[in-house]
Image: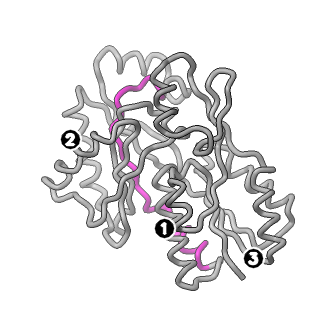
Amino acid sequence: MAIHIITDSSADLTAQEAKELNIRIVPMSVQFGDRSYLDGIDLTKPEFYRLLASGKDSPTTAQPTPADFLSLFEKVREAGDEAVVLPISGALSGTYQSAVIAKDMCKYGPIHIVDSRSASAGIHLLAEEACRLRDAGASAQEIVRALEELKGRVRIFALIDTLEYLRRGGRLSNFQAGLGTVTKLKPVISVREGAVLVVGKAFGVSAAMKQLLRFLSEHPVDNSFPAYALYSDDESRVEDFVPRLRELDLLPKELRRCSIGPTIGTHIGPGAVGMAYIETA
């Protein structure tokens, strides 16, 4: 009995990564004006940020429908296999609920849905661990138990360039966002309890970077797992970030890179840099 690992496009896996890991991806949809795209299928990350920078339309994202998951679940049922499903945090999207509805429609017990309580490379890390356990011969139940234990240790911290996109997404009031613009505050965000939160603000990029590094030092990396340097539109931000990590002995043993896609990019905008990793227990 095979075990299928399924997630959605908010995990920001590339097509090549998904193929190598044997992960099935359910795409989110992204709307710019009257045009709708499927994340990772007919909208690339560079194209998304180009459209975002044009300022013509503010994007919105929509979760996959139950029918999108049901088509995969029915294939799992027909094969007599099992599935472990890792959608984006239920606090950020209705994707988890869509998957639950699809499981009810499918009426097939061996489909296991785990609320990742995370996004982007945070889901990526959990999905990689699920694949490692699957390939090592673990049962679906064992994989679920491991993910439930591990997901509380996933950490994401990032410096973003402006509060504006959080305001547009309804995560800040107009007053809070306007204050940040006037005073040139640079926010530091985190994903906590499954939600994107502003955990710090500082005057200018240099001071905000010091805050970001402080958060990383207070929540040390578990080097038995890979970590991901995150960026939105500008990978060169990582080139500036890595020496700062090395200087403070915060550089993970295995640091990969992950470009933040439309699901989170809609809310944080261009110019972001940060890290996703598993914290030491």
Q: Depth check: give the residue in front, 193 or 73.
A: 73
Q: Earlier in the sequence, mark 1 or mark 3?
A: 3
Instruction: Give the amino acid at mark 2.
Output: Lys
Circle 1 residues within 10 Å: few <14, some 14–19, many ≥20: some
State left or right for residue 110 relative to residue 194.
right
The secondary structure type at the circle numbered 2 is helix
Q: Kindly indicate the quadrant of the structure image that contains residue 63.
A: top right
Looking at the picture, how far across and down is residue 89, in whole percent?
58, 50
Q: Looking at the image, is mark 1 or mark 3 nearer the viewer?
A: 3
Circle 3 residues within 10 Å: few <14, some 14–19, many ≥20: some
Q: Earlier in the sequence, mark 2 or mark 1?
A: 1
Q: Looking at the image, is mark 3 or mark 2 nearer the viewer?
A: 3
- Which residue sits at x=47%, y=31%? 49
Quickly name the residue at label 1: 150
Highlighted range, magenta? 142-165
Instruction: Give the amino acid at mark 3.
Output: Asp
- Which residue sits at x=76%, y=73%? 110
Say above or below: 161 vs 62.
above
State left or right for residue 240 relative to residue 117.
left
Q: Kindly indicate the quadrant of the structure image that contains residue 40.
A: top right
The secondary structure type at the circle numbered 3 is loop
Looking at the picture, how far across and down is residue 266, in whole percent?
52, 32
The span from disc 3 to disc 2 (Cα, nearest Å) is 48 Å
Circle 2 residues within 10 Å: few <14, some 14–19, many ≥20: some
Quickly name the residue at label 3: 81
Does 145 lie within the magenta span?
yes
Quickly name the residue at label 2: 210
Looking at the picture, how far across and down is residue 126, in whole percent?
51, 64
Say above or below: 44 vs 69.
above
Q: Depth check: give the residue in front, 14 or 82.
A: 14
- Which residue sits at x=72%, y=50%? 97
Looking at the picture, how far across and down is residue 203, in whole percent?
23, 26
